[in-house]
Amino acid sequence: MQDDFDRLLDRRGTGALKWDRRTPEEKRRGIVPLSVADMEFPCARPIQEAVRRAAEHGLYGYTDPDERYFDAVTGWLLRRHGMRVRSEDIVCENGVIPALSTALRALTREGEGVICFTPVYYPFAQVITLNNRRMAECPLLRSADGRYEMDFNRLEDLARRQDVTALILCSPHNPVGRVWTREELTQVVDICRRHGVLMLSDEIHFDIVLEGEHTVLARAGEGAADRCVLLTSPSKTFNLAGLRIANLIIQNPDLRASYKRQQEADGNSNIAYFGRAAAIAAYEECAPWVDALCGYLRGNFSWMEAFFSQRLPGAVLTRTEGTYFAWADFSAWGMDDAALSRFLRERAGLVLDDGTMFGAGGSGCARFNIALPRQELKKALDRLDAAVKGASL
Ligand SMILES: Cc1ncc(COP(=O)(O)O)c(C=O)c1O
């Protein structure tokens, strides 16, 4: 497996979004992007074989989640997350972001406020505002060593407002890489339940844990499952984003019925043929691959952490506990956001996600996708080191 993680696949000509969005100059230089959230690792062999078998069948008709599919999903949730789920609690979707959009329309009203801990994965703000809801920002607090924490006082202030009715939680948190502790999540549940705030918990990264232990929000406190929509997908864990498959766990029957009504209104009721085949193979056969992946990512992050402390004075790298992102703060270098973005992209030849994309708290920061062969990560950071020396910061 190590060999698979160390080998860079050529994705040119596959429509790969992350690669195609590079500038012509970056393409000419063969710059490996560290941006959009998929991994530069081939899928595990059992998944490749399942997709190949599905392709060989030759008929790719409308597909329903069947017993085999539900068994695979419920088996994974039980074995990896200690969560017992019934098939009827699962609602299938073709992506977590489309599902969040449907959930907002089904379970909140126009004009209502939706709490997010910021900086956060930027499509949250888009689905909230484009569905005519309001973003209620709860900025994360940051200690001097770069660790982010929730501001429970602010959360409570927002939750108690009549016009604030939902929270979108990102757990583990993209981009700052926190794996929220059970204690933190229990407080979130307590506050939300006390004020009748619905919890939409995006746990798409829940298998990618480098440090600590992930707790599913629905299991974090008394009555949590009843006020919670859990959004999961095999797409991040197994690198299947292009197969468009996601699963919601909605244990409260009224919430589930409302969600399904909106899903029907959206004309969205089947699952992806290839996604089904891949998800079954992933959940049934690929647990060892996920363990190896987390080990490899841990190695990448440790290497990067050492590099930052030895070679990039002033830059603060937040410890990644979960996800395959590293979040770095360059504000000590004294550049404004536009200058920092230009410096990282044009001088250092790095294709990253600028911190400002993730909301106000992202100023001075950038997100690195570290799910790529270590050699490629090293090449990218060597370019940054050289640019810093050239600019004599
Ligand atoms: C927190 C989070 N949620 C959702 C998504 C996207 O999910 P999907 O492609 O299933 O819509 C991502 C992708 O980066 C993500 O990081």
Image (cartoon, rainbow, N blue to C red):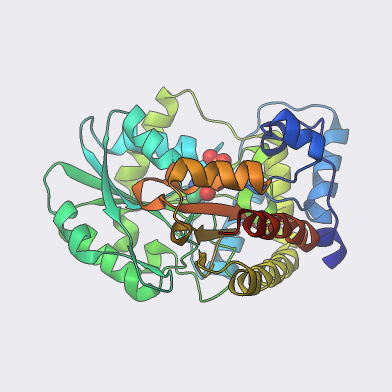
Quarter of the view holding residue 284 = bottom right
Residue sitting at x 80%, y 26%: 59
Viewer-proximal residue among 47 and 241: 241
Residue sitting at x 60%, y 69%: 308
Residue sitting at x 62%, y 37%: 244
219 vs 222, left or right, is right
Quarter of the view holding residue 292 = bottom right
Q: Position of residue 242 (x, y in %)?
A: 68, 38
Quarter of the view holding residue 57 = top right
281 vs 318, left or right, is right
211 vs 116, left or right, is right
- The mark tally for this picture is 0
Q: Position of residue 160 (x, y in %)?
A: 13, 54
Whether residue 193 appears in this view of the structure is: no
Viewer-proximal residue among 275 and 88: 275
Whether residue 173 appears in this view of the structure is: yes
Q: Position of residue 232 (x, y in %)?
A: 52, 51
Q: Position of residue 106 (x, y in %)?
A: 32, 34
Residue sitting at x 86%, y 56%: 7
283 vs 337, left or right, is right
The N terminus, quarter of image: bottom right
128 is higher (above) or lower (below) than 35: above
The C terminus, quarter of image: bottom right
191 is higher (above) or lower (below) than 143: above
185 is higher (above) or lower (below) than 117: below
